[in-house]
Amino acid sequence: MYVTPEQIQAANKANVESLLAVANAQFSAFEKLANISANAFKSVFEDSIANTRALLGAKDVQEFVSLQNAFAQPAIEKAIAYSKSVYGVATETNGELSKVAERRVAEWNENFVSLLDKVSKNAPAGSDVAVAAVKSMLAAGNAAYDNFTKVTKQATEIAEANVAAATETVKGLAKAKKAA
C-alpha cells in the first residue's frame, strides 16, 4: 500500500481549497465590517455636526435640554442597529467557516474509511476485530461531532433570541424614558 503522487496532489489541492475558502470568508467579513464601521462613523460625524448646530441655536436652557433628550433616542437606535449589523456579519461568517470545517471533516472521514477498507483487505487474518473497532470508534467520534454541532447551533439560536430580546428591551426602555 503506497501513496501515489496523485493522492498527494489531491490532498494538497483539497487543503489549498479549504484554506482559500477560509481566507475568502474572513476577507468578506472584514470588508463587511469595514463598510459597516465606515458608515457608522460617517453617520455619527454628520449627526454630531447637526446636533452641535442645533444646540448652538438653542434660545434658552429648556430648549437646550429638550434638544439633548431628542438626540438620545436616534443615537441609541443607531447603536443598536450597528450592533445588530456586526452580530449579523459575525454569525454569517461563523456559518461559512462551519460549512468549510464540516466539508473537511466529511472528506477526512471518507478518506479514512477508504484507507481502513484498503488496509483490512491486505491485513492478516484475525485483524477484522481491530479494523471493526477502529470503524466503531470513528462512528462514535462522528456521532459526538454531530451532537456537538447540533448543540452549537442550538446555542447560537438561543443567543440570537437573547440578542433580539435585549434589543427590544433597550428600545422599550428608551421609549419609556422618552415618554416620561
Image (tube, rainbow, N blue to C red):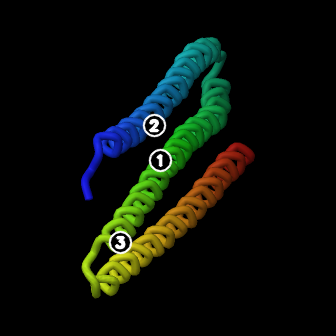
**Mark before the other along the chain sequence, 1 or 2:** 2
What residue is rendered at 35% in x and 68% in y?
116
Question: What is the number of the mark on residue 21?
Answer: 2
Specify the amino acid type for callout 3.
Lys
What residue is rendered at 53% in x and 49% in y?
95
Q: Residues within 10 Å of mark 3 (few under 14, many from 20)?
A: few
Q: Nearer the viewer, residue 108 or 67?
A: 108
**Mark before the other along the chain sequence, 3 or 2:** 2
Does residue 81 sit above or below 111 in this rendering? Answer: above
Quadrant position of the N terminus in the picture: bottom left
Question: What is the number of the mark on residue 100?
Answer: 1
Instruction: Determine the secondary structure under disc 2.
Output: helix
Q: CA distance from mark 1 to mark 3?
A: 32 Å
* Left or right of residue 135, residue 58 in this image: right
Q: Nearer the viewer, residue 8 or 99?
A: 8
* Left or right of residue 59, residue 40 in this image: left
Question: What is the number of the mark on residue 121?
Answer: 3
Instruction: Determine the secondary structure under disc 1.
Output: helix
Specify the amino acid type for callout 2.
Ala
Q: Position of residue 9 (x, y in %)?
A: 33, 38
Q: Position of residue 8 (x, y in %)?
A: 30, 43
Q: Are marks 1 and 2 in contact (CB under 8 Å)?
A: yes
Q: Residues within 10 Å of mark 1 (few under 14, many from 20)?
A: some
Instruction: Determine the secondary structure under disc 3.
Output: helix
Q: Quadrant of residue 7?
A: top left
Specify the amino acid type for callout 1.
Val
